Image (cartoon, rainbow, N blue to C red):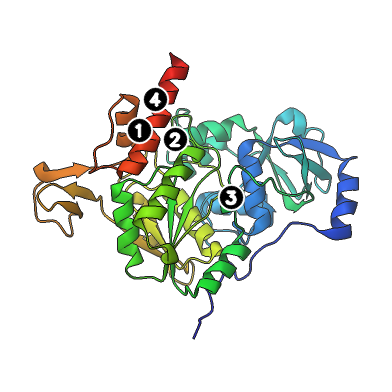
Amino acid sequence: MSKTLINPHGGSLVNRVLTGSERKAAQDKAKSLERIQLSERNASDIECIATGVYSPLTGFVSEEDYYSIVNDIRLSNGLAWSIPITLQVSTEQAAKLQVGQDITLVHPNGSQIAIMTIGDKYSPDQEQEAQKVYKTTDPAHPGVAAMKEAGSVYLGGTISVIDDLPAGDFPAHSFTPHQTRAEFAKRGWNTVVAFQTRNPIHRAHEYLTKVSLEIVDGLFINPLVGATKSDDIPADVRMNCYDVLMKDYYPNNRVALGTYPAAMRYAGPREAILHAISRQNYGCTHFIVGRDHAGVGDYYGTYEAQEIFEGFSPDELAITPLKFEHSFYCNKCGSMGSPKTCPHGKENHVFLSGTKVRQMLSEGTRPPAEFSRPEVADILVEFYSGKEKVSA
């Protein structure tokens, strides 16, 4: 007998997409409102809010929620939430705007994507936000840099999407939480493990996902396709890698691939919580948290993204984190393993990471079989050889 899928975070899925006559009226109204041009990250936030990925948020956070998130990793009502989802504008733009005013939010593609009623206008201490959320004020940190470049005045308020959300580059793999939940139910999956990635899946990732798949009904490979760092491998290349892996190395009836439209913030532990909440909203019961989840540089401890989950009870975060140590290929075992499963010394271990794979490729070195499946290596080698021809 099929069980009820895990509840969304906060109890119900948010839907802020207008339809029918309500949408038409809002589209007409939007033409006469003050316009705010969205960044790529804001556009991703709009999609995540409107479709329920960021449930229970109904818009960009209020001042009260902002301070509660930054200081306590919770919304003002006590519900777990780790990163303030903010709409920031310049002081010049802010001077034209008043609390209670309706504004039109313009997508980077030029469409009038949403209307927002301004509920709050505030100017927080961005140094404090950087230190609390990103654990650094270093302007070289990509999340800190993006936050400071976005503007010093924050607007909070409920949004209503008034146009079709752009299908993006991967329409065949673009699903809302309503759709993924329906698909999981159709497949009879009561337990689903989510895998967040912004890298091609190398052998260590494959190991983690398959170990996880031993204890649940289904695996949801959910790659992030929003904005990333300039040196991260582009989403279209990564999607090709996921496709060939799913075709040849995973059981077709136990794995699904769907894109996660959010932008990376590189907030390490805090972002691990946001990623987990998002996957709970998609209908997942378990979430893989490996080494240095959502990390960048040396800003976070190796397992800090796992430790942060200890601050929340199952009543606060219903999704179960699956915590993995750094896995490796052991030459003596002839297989993947971890410190928990392999008895051999480090001299036998080949340690894998997305950073190391990118470094090898940029140096013209093909990742060996211990690092990457040959089909994936072929795609990556072709991409990097193309980059070299362009830059030559």
Residue at 51% over, 64% down: 280
Q: Nearer the viewer, residue 270 or 388?
A: 388
Can you give x and y, in whole percent of width and height, for residue 215 in the image? 34, 70
Marks 4 & 2, CB-CB < 8 Å contact: no
Marks 2 & 3, CB-CB < 8 Å contact: no
For marks 2 and 1 on the same chain, the one whose residue lies earlier in the sequence: 2
For marks 4 and 3 on the same chain, the one whose residue lies earlier in the sequence: 3
Residue 96 in which image quadrant: top right
Q: Nearer the viewer, mark 4 or mark 3?
A: 4
Marks 2 & 1, CB-CB < 8 Å contact: yes
Residue at 14% over, 51% down: 334
The answer to whether 306 is drawn above or below residue 9 in the figure is above
Marks 1 & 3, CB-CB < 8 Å contact: no
For marks 2 and 3 on the same chain, the one whose residue lies earlier in the sequence: 3
Give the residue at the far bottom of this rendering: 1
The disc labelled 1 sits on which kind of residue? Arg
The answer, for residue 303, to whether it is visible in the render is no
Q: Dot 1, how many residues are within 10 Å of its Cα: few (below 14), some (14-19), or many (20+)?
A: many
Q: Nearer the viewer, mark 4 or mark 2?
A: 4
Residue 233's label in the rendered image is 2
Residue at 66% over, 47% down: 167
Real-space Cα distance between discs 1 and 3? Answer: 37 Å
For marks 4 and 1 on the same chain, the one whose residue lies earlier in the sequence: 1
Q: Secondary structure at mark 2?
A: loop
Real-space Cα distance between discs 2 and 1? Answer: 8 Å
The disc labelled 2 sits on which kind of residue? Ile
Q: Nearer the viewer, mark 4 or mark 1?
A: 4
- Horizontal side of residue 385 vs 77, given as left or right: left
Quarter of the image where the C terminus is located:
top left
Residue 67's label in the rendered image is 3
For marks 1 and 3 on the same chain, the one whose residue lies earlier in the sequence: 3
